[in-house]
Image (cartoon, rainbow, N blue to C red):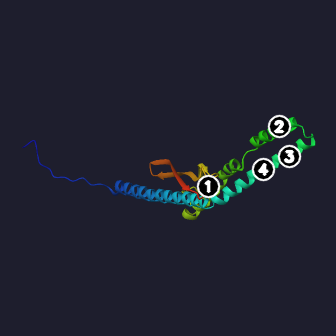
Amino acid sequence: MSILKKENGSITLEAAMIIPLFLALILLLTSFVKITIAEMALKESVSETAQTVAHYSYLTLTAVNAIDQATDGFIDSLGEGAASRAGNSEIAKVLMSKFADKAKGAIPSSGKLLESVDQSVYKEVVTEKYKQKVGSSGFYNADGIKIVSSSVPTSTDSAMAKVEAEVELNLVIPFFEKTIKIKKKALERGWVGN
């Protein structure tokens, strides 16, 4: 009798092992497609918002300049009126002009006020455009969009409209759960005239 016998055998993989792995792979691939859809939707939403802001930047710049001139003119007229009531004293004129200059510096410019308002406006617009593209699914988390940074063209020197937004997606696959952040940025040159 020989100690070593040749035996032919085979390894059988049970369907109980293969099917769950196959389904996990299918779920992973569909999750990749969903992430790609969310990324494209956020990119388009941010880009369209920046283009719209850049398109209307000349009107914004005109309004900012008009408000600043009206504010400066109002403060100057107050200073001149107070100086004339004090008499034609040179001291009163100098003091009131210095007071008017300090008051102009203390009042925030309309451009700064506009920049403080733009965060909430951008969030609303980007969220609405994102919802139109992906729907109201819980995976896409349209209400979780955050505006990371933004700017409005407020002068001819800084004529760039910038919107940067991010959204967090909760990726759930069997044996695996991860939060993914997608961040997109759009920068558009605004038309601000001469």
Which of the two marks, 3 or 2, is nearer to us in this view? 2
Q: Residues within 10 Å of mark 2 (few under 14, many from 20)?
A: few
Q: Earlier in the sequence, mark 1 or mark 4?
A: 4
At label 2, which amino acid type do we have? Val
Residue, disc 2? 94
Distance CA(mark 3)–CA(mark 2): 14 Å
Which of the two marks, 1 or 4, is nearer to us in this view? 4
Residue 144 lies, in percent from the top left, at 60, 52
Q: Could you say whether the residue bearing mark 1 is in a helix, strand or loop?
A: helix
Is 18 on the left or on the right of 183, as rendered? left
Q: Could you say whether the residue bearing mark 4 is in a helix, strand or loop?
A: helix
At label 3, which amino acid type do we have? Leu
Residue, disc 1? 143
Which of the two marks, 1 or 2, is nearer to us in this view? 2
Picture residue at 72% right of the left edge, 50% below the top: 110
Q: Could you say whether the residue bearing mark 3 is in a helix, strand or loop?
A: helix
Q: Residues within 10 Å of mark 3 (few under 14, many from 20)?
A: some
Question: Mark 2 and mark 3 in contact (Cβ < 8 Å)?
Answer: no
Question: Mark 2 and mark 1 in contact (Cβ < 8 Å)?
Answer: no
Residue, disc 4? 71
Q: Earlier in the sequence, mark 3 or mark 2?
A: 3
Residue, disc 3? 78
Q: Quadrant of the N terminus?
A: top left
Distance CA(mark 2)–CA(mark 4): 20 Å
Residue 85 visible in the displayed image: yes
Q: Could you say whether the residue bearing mark 2 is in a helix, strand or loop?
A: helix
Q: Earlier in the sequence, mark 3 or mark 4?
A: 4
